[in-house]
Amino acid sequence: MSPHATAVPTATRTRPRRTPRPGGRLLAAVTVLATGVLAAGCGVRLETPPPTEPSPDAVEVLRAGAVDDALAVADLVADVTPSVTDPATLAALEEAAAFAEQHADALGGVYDSGLDDLDLPAGDTTSTAPADDTDEPADAGGTEEDGTEDDVAADEPGAATTDDVVVALVEAAQRTGSSADAATDAGLARLLASVAASEHVSAQRLAALTGSTSADVLVTTAPPVEEAPAGIGAADLATLVETEDAAGYAYEVRAAQSEDDARTAAVARAAEHRARGQAWALAAGTDGTAQEPRRVAYVLPDDADVAVLARQVESGLAQTYASLVAAAAPTSRAGAVALLVDAWASAVAWGEAPVAFPGLPEQAAG
């Protein structure tokens, strides 16, 4: 397994305010209302301080960080799109932005306690609402005195570029994957790992279309399996051994029926999956024992060519590793996250259509 990763602080890029989560607003309003009723009932005016913003716990920090990263990608795409003319690049940008919005929504959106909207006593200065400054900056945009528009040209130095979007996707994928490893909530960890896989593939696809080298820093192969993640039982390990071994068998059979590049790719991928099956068997301690789950042969669909079968195999493995992320203990998931990313990137390379939540079939079902 790779060294344990820790969550990385999110970027500080200024972004538009998004739709807040309603839970905090309702709780704050009910708290204030209840205080007023109690005061009126006993005839005593309670001098209590106004409510303050709650401090986020570790889970909220990871959740909010992933939301910020997703919205940063969407905002950058909005800035860049007007200057892009290539249809394929435009499609990739729009897809990345759509996925980013879906990620933010699934993660709960931008948190807002609702305290800014409460009616606080006159003269109170504890509200977190921004001051209503009446003095506008000298260069605030809009219409100049001569009636011309003061817009920033797309090619002006400092304007956002497609490479900036690739960088944002790369950094988001890295941070979100680290957060998936660190999260103490299993469901959030599984969701974060899926989002990281989606961001990883989006970064690679956009980089390939634009010639950007910024995605080269992404790890494109999962590290070797050396030990089982903490919290994983014998039954789950047996499933991993058999699933990886079956994947290797499927590629071997179709490689024998294929030619040229498809054959070469299938042979290489078969070796990877067979090796992972062996590594999981060693980690589980079942290699060469009576509990060995591997078989001599596995049933394959008759009508699936190598590309179709590869997409099925890799998408299935993405689901398996997403489940492994949820089952594993915090700070022992880095390998499972990397294997989820690896399986999904391979599925897309074989022609699978990118989705916002790889490995999460319930999200695809709506």
Image (cartoon, rainbow, N blue to C red):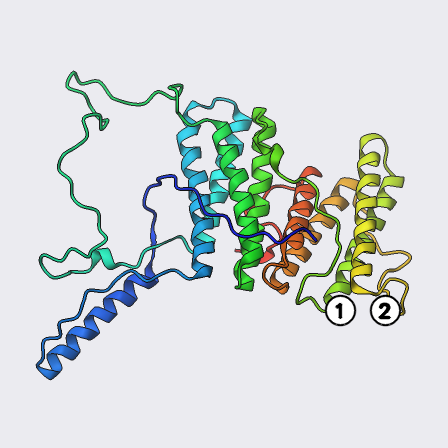
Q: Residue at x 33, y 54 (%)?
A: 20
In the rendering, which numbered label is found on residue 257? none
Q: Position of residue 342 (x, y in %)?
A: 68, 45
Q: Residue at x 65, y 50 (%)?
A: 340
Is residue 107 among the parts visible in the rendering?
A: no
Depicted 242 relative to depicted 314: above or below? below
Is residue 74 among the parts visible in the rendering?
A: yes
State the SS at label 2. loop
Q: Residues within 10 Å of mark 2 (few under 14, many from 20)?
A: few
Kindly check if marks 1 and 2 are in contact, taking CB atoms under 8 A apart as contact. Answer: yes
Q: Residues within 10 Å of mark 1 (few under 14, many from 20)?
A: some
Depicted 44 relative to depicted 209: above or below? below
Q: Amino acid at mark 1?
A: Ala
Q: Amino acid at mark 2?
A: Gln
The count of marks equals: 2
Q: Is residue 18 left or right of residue 299?
A: left
Q: Nearer the viewer, residue 244 or 58?
A: 58
Q: Which residue is mark 1?
A: 234
Q: Is residue 133 left or right of residue 153?
A: left
Question: For residue 264, what is the image quadrant?
Answer: top right
Q: Position of residue 253 (x, y in %)?
A: 87, 45
Q: Is residue 263 left or right of residue 168?
A: right
Q: Position of residue 64 (x, y in %)?
A: 42, 53
Q: Which residue is mark 2?
A: 291
Q: CA distance from mark 1 to mark 2?
A: 10 Å
Query: Furthest-bottom residue in view?
Result: 42
The mark that comes first in sequence, 1 or 2, is 1
Q: Nearer the viewer, residue 109 or 121?
A: 121
